[in-house]
Image (cartoon, helix red, strand yellow):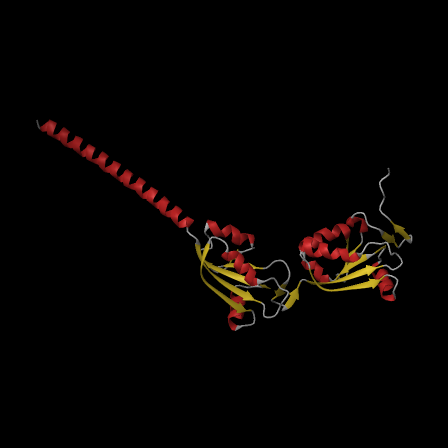
Amino acid sequence: MKKESIMYAIGYTVLGLILLFGAVLAWSARATVSAKITEQEEAAKPAEIELTLIAPSSCDQCIDGKALLEEIEKQDVRVLGAETFLGDSEEGKSLIAKYEIKRLPAILVEGQYDKANIREALDSLGAEEKDAALLIQVKQPVYVDVASNAIVGLVDATYLTDSSCPDCYDPTQHRAILVNTFNVTIQSEKSIDAQSAEGRALIDRYAITQTPALLLSSQAASYDRLVETWKQVGTIEEDGTFVFRQSTALGAVTYKDLTTGEVVRPETPKE
């Protein structure tokens, strides 16, 4: 009888442990599911962030920092606060020093910037993490270089025309390509006749062999895509001037070969 009682006790103990273990597993499963649901609900909520714009003090042609802020605000975010400081203000100078800002405008993003529903969009703007914040600095012109306080990306364009070739293409057509394809900001433009003293000086200085031609100031070097493309159609001189040299790159255009003195016309299809 005593043996049977012991066996019953052991059995009840084992059963109790099994039930307890099952209860623990069920609780753990419910807790896991609840945590996942909570995590999913949290992930679905807009990211709560704070924005700070450090803007250049004087640069009408610079990229609009407020437009960048608006792009961020269009994302799945809840902006808890937004401030703007000029780069030469005490607050601006302090932020520039703290976050080692090199170009203006710049934007600081604080808060839940790591959430999946916002981080990818911020990274696409060139964000980099610094001191518990994300720093977004403009990479393409026009912007202010903080170290030199100089405006970067304002390009001067010179169109070298040729009055001895009235049928030659109009070099000002380069403008639309520069602006629309490469987002170049042209600060000033002028046309110079290849037959003038100034025009002949440019031809001699840069060994130009075709007219019309286009010359861009050294600020064109701040446009990375333009620099890469220019390697195929022209040269970048020692003084930084960009000289366009491949008229045929424009398609079927008429131009003058200064080496032979001949006007080169596009071939017409044979019937």
Q: Quadrant of the C terminus?
A: top right
For image coordinates 83% across by 59% down, the residue present is 161
> Which residue is more in the foreground, 269 or 58?
269
> Could you say where residue 218 lies in the image, as x and y percent from the top left?
73, 62
Q: Quadrant of residue 152?
A: bottom right
Single out the residue that lies furthest toward the left: 1
For image coordinates 86% across by 48% down, the residue present is 265
Q: Is residue 210 left or right of residue 176?
A: right
Relative to residue 59, is residue 235 depicted above or below?
above
**For the image shown, how many numbered marks are present on the structure?**
0
Relative to residue 267, is residue 181 depicted above or below?
below
Q: Quadrant of residue 184?
A: bottom right
> Which residue is more in the foreground, 113 or 236?
113
> Could you say where residue 104 lies in the image, as x and y percent from the top left?
58, 64
> Could you say where residue 192 lies in the image, as x and y percent from the top left?
82, 63
Q: Is residue 263 left or right of residue 241?
A: right
> Could you say where residue 247 lies in the image, as x and y percent from the top left?
81, 51
Q: Quadrant of the N terminus?
A: top left
Q: Is residue 69 left or right of residue 35?
A: right
Q: Is residue 4 left or right of residue 36?
A: left
Q: Quadrant of residue 206?
A: bottom right
> Which residue is more in the foreground, 66 or 217?
66
For image coordinates 11% across by 29% down, the residue present is 5
> Which residue is more in the foreground, 208 or 71?
71
